[in-house]
Each structure stands twice: as structure tokens, then as C-alpha cells.
Image (tube, helix red, strand yellow):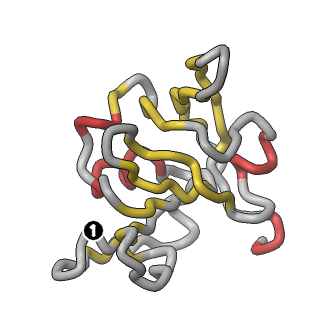
């Protein structure tokens, strides 16, 4: 998990260009395509950065996407769990499989927010597409 991970795209921090939303690029030599019809699966609209020793850190949001619209997730939050399952034990494909789901379905993200309080919390997000992309 040393790259960028969006609702269904990954790129290494070495500077690979953004992958289209239906393509995963787990490393420079291997490309795994996840071909899913847009109507069948939706995501949460978060781009994660894999940081060694920390895990998947929220780096950006899809403008108008479910996570941004929830106003509960912030840049810098660290993804700990998806629906109660530890993400540190997941491959990139498992992360995509757990983050993606039918439009309108809910996914629970367990996040850690750094700072003086150092809080850990759960956020329920309804999967969908960015409002500007509807």
C-alpha cells in the first residue's frame, strides 16, 4: 500500500499519471483492470496516499463525491478499517472490492485523525458518484 488509492484507482508515489477510474495500477510493472459497469458499482470518492508506517492517508476527494458531501472525513485522516476489517491486511484489489458497492449502499470506514486528541472514529458513507458527474 505505497501508492495513491481512489475509489478504484491506485498509483505509486513515484509519479505515475492518474489512472482512469476503472483501472488499478498497483506497481510500475503490473496493471490490473477492474472492468465494472458504472451502473453496478459506485465508490466513496476518496483518494488515499499509501504512507509507509502509517497506512492509507486521505489525500483528496472527488469534488461532489460521497465523502466530501458527508463533511465527516478530512484530508490527513488515516483509513484503519472498512466495515470492521483491518485494511493493513488487504491487497489493493481487496480494498477496491470493499470500498466499491452498489450505488446507494453504505460502507463504514474506521478512521484515525491525528492531532492532540488522536481520535479514532467510524463514518458511514453512502456509495455513489460525484454530484457534478451525475
* Badge 1 element: loop
Residue at (56, 18) in percent of width and height: 120
Tell me the quarter of the image containing the C terminus: bottom right
Q: Position of residue 1 (x, y in %)?
A: 30, 53
In the displayed structure, 119 sits above or below 70; it is above
In the displayed structure, 118 sits above or below 33; it is above
**Between 121 and 130, which is closer to the camera in this rendering?**
121
Q: Quadrant of residue 62?
A: bottom right
Q: Residue furthest left?
A: 29
Q: Position of residue 77 (x, y in %)?
A: 59, 38
Q: Quadrant of residue 72?
A: top right
Drawn side of residue 86 relative to residue 74, left or right:
left
Q: Position of residue 29 (x, y in %)?
A: 17, 82
Q: Residues within 10 Å of mark 1 (few under 14, many from 20)?
A: many
In the displayed structure, 97 sits above or below 121; it is below
In the displayed structure, 62 sits above or below 91; it is below
**Between 80 and 37, which is closer to the camera in this rendering?**
80
Residue at (35, 71) in percent of width and height: 24
Q: Residue furthest front?
A: 116
**Between 87 and 66, which is closer to the camera in this rendering?**
87
Which residue, given by chain and number where applicable, does mark 1 sit on?
26
**Between 102 and 76, which is closer to the camera in this rendering?**
76
Drawn side of residue 113 relative to residue 55, left or right:
right
Residue at (44, 68) in percent of width and height: 9
Amino acid at each position: 500500500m505505497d501508492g495513491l488509492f481512489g475509489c478504484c484507482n491506485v498509483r505509486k508515489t513515484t509519479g505515475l499519471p492518474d489512472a482512469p477510474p476503472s483501472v488499478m495500477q498497483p506497481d510500475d510493472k503490473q496493471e490490473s483492470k477492474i472492468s465494472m459497469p458504472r451502473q453496478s458499482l459506485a465508490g466513496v470518492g476518496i483518494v488515499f496516499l499509501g504512507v509507509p508506517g502509517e497506512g492509507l492517508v486521505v489525500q483528496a476527494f472527488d469534488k461532489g463525491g460521497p465523502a466530501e458531501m458527508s463533511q465527516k472525513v478530512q484530508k490527513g485522516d488515516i483509513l484503519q478499517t472498512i466495515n470492521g476489517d483491518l485494511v493493513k491486511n488487504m491487497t489493493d484489489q481487496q480494498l477496491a472490492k470493499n470500498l466499491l458497492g452498489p450505488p446507494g449502499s453504505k460502507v463504514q470506514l474506521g478512521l484515525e485523525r491525528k492531532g492532540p486528541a488522536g481520535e479514532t472514529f467510524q463514518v458511514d458513507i453512502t456509495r455513489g458518484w460525484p454530484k457534478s458527474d451525475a
